[in-house]
Image (spheres, rainbow, N blue to C red):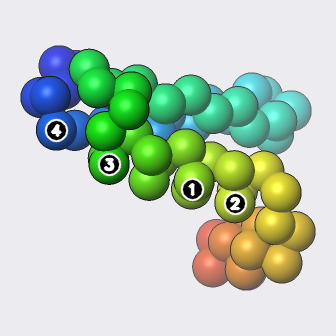
Amino acid sequence: MELNHNQAALILSASEDGEITMDVESPDMNGLASALCHALAKKLMQDERFQAELMEVLGR
């Protein structure tokens, strides 16, 4: 996937045992889109309440 200068992607990978890893990709790692992806990744990693809400949405 090729990203434009004003785009960023939060890439989630799931292992077979359910471990999730995250990566942020962007042509402009100092831009707004990249900053938002990094903030989302941080929230996903650190906010247990948010993690529980996501698992509830997924029915797990």
Q: Mark 2 to mark 4: distance in Å?
A: 22 Å
In the orientation shown, which residue stands out farthest toward the left?
A: 4
* Amino acid type, residue under disc 3 in the picture: Leu
- 59 lies above or below 36: below
Q: Dot 3 corresponds to which residue? A: 32
* Amino acid type, residue under disc 1 in the picture: Leu
Label 4 environment density (alpha carbons within 10 Å; few <14, some 14–19, many ≥20): few
- 5 lies above or below 35: above
Q: Nearer the viewer, mark 2 or mark 3?
A: 3
Q: Residue at x 26, y 20 (%)?
A: 27
Are the residues tagged 4 and 3 within 8 Å (C-beta)?
Answer: yes
Q: Quadrant of residue 51?
A: bottom right
| Front in this rendered view, residue 46 or 60 | 46
* Amino acid type, residue under disc 4 in the picture: Asn
Q: Mark 4 to mark 1: distance in Å?
A: 17 Å
Between discs 4 and 1, the one toward the N terminus: 4
Tell me the number on the disc at residue 40.
1
SS category of the residue bearing label 4: loop
Q: Mark 4 to mark 3: distance in Å?
A: 8 Å
Are the residues tagged 3 and 1 within 8 Å (C-beta)?
Answer: no
Looking at the rendered image, the quarter that the C terminus falls into is bottom right
Are the residues tagged 2 and 3 within 8 Å (C-beta)?
Answer: no
Q: Nearer the viewer, mark 4 or mark 1?
A: 4
Q: Dot 2 corresponds to which residue? A: 43
| Front in this rendered view, residue 47 or 57 | 47
Q: Residue at x 87, y 68 (%)?
A: 48
Q: Is residue 9 visible?
A: no
Are the residues tagged 1 and 2 within 8 Å (C-beta)?
Answer: yes
Are the residues tagged 2 and 4 within 8 Å (C-beta)?
Answer: no
